[in-house]
Image (spheres, rainbow, N blue to C red):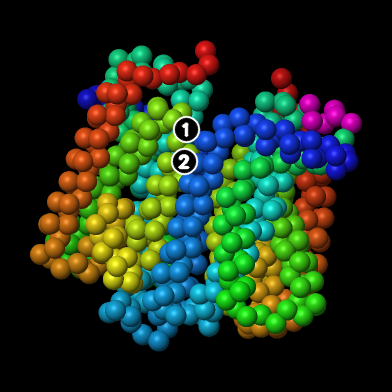
Amino acid sequence: MGLNTFWQFVRLRLKERMEYRAAYVVGVAAQIFGYGAQFVVVWLLLRRFGTIAGWTWPEVAFLYSFELFTYALGAAFTFSPMTDLERMVRDGTFDGVLVRPTNPYVYLTARMYNVGYVAHVLLSAGVLVWAITQLHLAWSPLALVFLAAAIVSAALIQMAAITFIGAWPFRLGRVGFLFTIHYRLKDFVLYPVSVYTVSIQVLLTVIVPFAFINFYPATVLLSKDAGFFPGWIGWFAPVVGPLLFFGAYRFWFRGVNAYQGAGG
Amino acid sequence: MTTYFHFFAKSFKSNLAYRAQVWLSILASLLAIVSQVAIWRALLASGPVNGIALRDMITYVILNSAIYVVLMYEMFEEVDDRLRTGDIAIDLIKPMRYPLYLLADQLGNTAYRLAFYVAPTVFVAALLFGLTAPASPLHAAAFVMAMGIATILSFAFGYLIALLAFHFLTTLHFSWTFLGLVIMFSGSFLPLWFFPAGWADVARALPFQFLGFVPAAIYMGKMPVTEIAPTLAVGLMWIVLLMGAAALMWAVSMRRLVVQGG
């Protein structure tokens, strides 16, 4: 499937949404308010306490918005198809995807590309830019390249996590609860990972490597302490995403290949 | 009355079908508690702030995770769904009062979660981190009442939002806004003690503090005894106010309900 087909799909989705333009705009505003409230609470917390594990408000805002921004980038592709897969497997529509002459993963992520993450992107990009201006970073060319690579890699980690969950409907049937656990685990990295006990730091680095989404890139860019692991671990952030995504993609296809159809 | 009791029992029992979910929901609640306790451990490492010590905050975190689970935040999604599919027409034809049916149905969910999610989560969290006892029998009794107020108030909010959906055919905008207000002003993550003065005044003037801060503060004895009764009275007043508004809206909605599709 070419890039042209993808844009065609995105244009169709946008047209669909714009059918109810006023409702769409109000919805985006309400969503910005809902997510903005989380930023406000963290801001109030740090107004009272100054720092958390040595991180100031602009630094925590950087962590928080980096996570939300890359989530929006990644989840726009994977969230809708992977949450809907459970239903598609149950009612047999997934069979229709398999008989198409395209890669089913590429087809689903393009066809169901979610244009509804506008609120996430506006809010998180706004806060991210604000945090960066507050932090007075020295922007060397290397730092800029690292930032860009870390954003791409983080978006791929976010895609990988959802794709990994999406491989389970073929095996388990119901997977809604896996998403809940996934979000609770991801909540951990909204704060500097160094505040947690060593076992949780290991969990978030090795087993469910969400710390590579925002925490480790931030330790490099903001020159912060990486906690239990040595400081150079942050430099691996740009490669973790592609590797994890590749693994999750393969794992998803193993699920598809095991798929026998729900019958009926 | 027996009709509604059957709805209550039915929604309680239908939850029993998903037993694997119980373990994972407990795990999810525990994960939230673990992360918040770690954050407060870092923030309060150098001693109490505003007279609040780490062990107080641990109790506060555990109580709020319990409060969050019993509140009826999923109700508008259900009504939203039934409005979109048109099933709402069938609900309304049935010889029952729809609001009472909703309440019975939601109370069934709440009772189920209380027994199977909240009790084990609180038990495990208390073993792991330590939970202080209620400040006194009086505070314990007031806490139970405050929990009752929180439950009914969350129903009142959910019901109002569901009714707004009768006009706007979606609840999403309102539920996002509502949850944003809850996140900011309920105190369920950041207690009102730690709010700057202006923000605290706003939070105390709004009803959202009853959905998190008030029950926990009463349990912990962090609210002066003389303030408990007036505070609970204010909570009841909010319930009456919101339910009154909902009754008015219900009357209007029933005259102009549009069911989509056919």
Q: What chain letter is assigned to the residue under label 2?
A: B
Callout 1: chain? B
| Relative image position of residue A192 (x, y in whole percent) | 57, 74
x and y percentages locating residue A62 in the rendered image: 59, 70
Q: Residue at x 27, y 42 (%)?
A: B152
Per the image, is A98 magenta?
yes
Q: Is residue A95 left or right of residue A21?
A: right
Pick the quarter of the image with the C terminus of chain A.
top right
Residue B104 higher or lower than B50, as above or below: above
Secondary structure, mark 2, is helix
Which quadrant of the structure image shows residue A116? top right
Q: Is residue B167 a member of the stretch shown in magenta?
A: no
Q: Residue furthest bottom?
A: B46
Residue for badge 1: B170
Where residue A235 sits, quadrant-wise, is bottom right
The amino acid on which the numbered mark 1 sits, given as a three-letter code, is: Thr
Name the residue carrying label 2. Answer: B173
Which region is colored magenta?
A: A96-101
Which quadrant, please, contains the N terminus of chain A? top right
Residue situated in front as seen by the camera: B83 or B107:
B83
Q: Residues within 10 Å of mark 1 (few under 14, many from 20)?
A: many
Would residue B141 appear left or right of A214 to someone viewing this image? Answer: left
Residue A40 can be seen, yes or no: yes
Proximity of marks 1 and 2: CB atoms separated by less than 8 Å: yes
Residue at left offset 41%, top offset 69%: A44
Residue at position x 81%, y 60% in the image? A242
